[in-house]
Amino acid sequence: MRMGEITSLTWDQLNLKEKRFELEPDQTKDKEKRFVPIPDTLLKTLVEIPRALHNDHIFLYKGKPLKSIRASLKKACEAVKRMEKYLFNTEKKVIKKSDLKMEKLT
């Protein structure tokens, strides 16, 4: 699926019985009706998303439909990099401390 197709998904396009999204021709770049299967893990997550009373879109941010997730993905990647850096530094400190302990024991 294209990013625009994902961010514009509405609850009426979700067919729980068939485990798929149903895209109408006017919603696809190819202008053809398309059925997109949903893996069980994603289906479980979708079922847990609360439905908004004022908007039929599946993916909302602050009550409004998402337009893009690029900024969120960028922030998530930066957070992962910070976490990796922290874990690496922590791991180095642990190794240094254990090395010191081993030196004292021998």
Image (cartoon, rainbow, N blue to C red):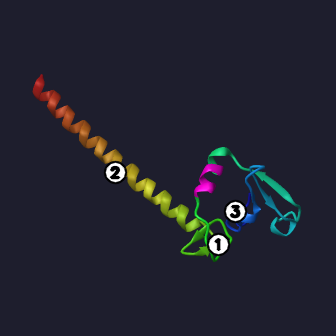
Magenta region includes residue 16: no
Image position, residue 4 (x, y; %): 71, 67
Per the model, the C-alpha gap separating discs 2 and 3 is 33 Å
Q: What amino acid type should be assigned to the residue bearing mark 3?
A: Ile
Circle 1 residue? 67
Q: Main secondary structure of the magenta part?
A: helix
- Which sits earlier in the primary sequence, circle 2 or circle 1? 1
Label 2 crowd bin: few (<14), some (14–19), many (20+), radius 10 Å: few
User: Where does residue 84 sit, x and y in percent of width and height?
Assistant: 40, 49
Q: 105 above or below 39?
A: above
Mark 2 or 3, nearer chain start? 3
Location of residue 67 with respect to 45 vertically, above or below: below
Residues shaded magenta:
43-48
Q: Quadrant of the C terminus?
A: top left
Q: Farthest residue in the right direction?
A: 32
Quadrant, the N terminus: bottom right
Element under label 1?
Answer: loop
Instruction: State the residue at coordinates (71%, 68%).
Output: 8
**x, y percent for residue 58:** 65, 65
Disc 1 versus disc 3: distance between alpha carbons? Answer: 10 Å
Decide which of 35, 5 is in the foreground and name it: 35
Circle nearer the viewer, 2 or 1 = 1
Q: Are marks 2 and 3 in contact (CB under 8 Å)?
A: no
Residue pictured at 83% horizontal, 65% vertical: 29
Q: Residue at x 82, y 54 (%)?
A: 35
Cα–Cα span, label 2 and label 1:
32 Å
Three-letter amino acid code at disc 1?
A: Lys
Q: Secondary structure at mark 2?
A: helix
Depth check, front residue: 81 or 45: 45
Residue that carries the numbered disc 3 in the rendered image: 6
Does dot 3 land on a helix, a strand or a loop?
A: helix
Report the residue marked by disc 2: 86
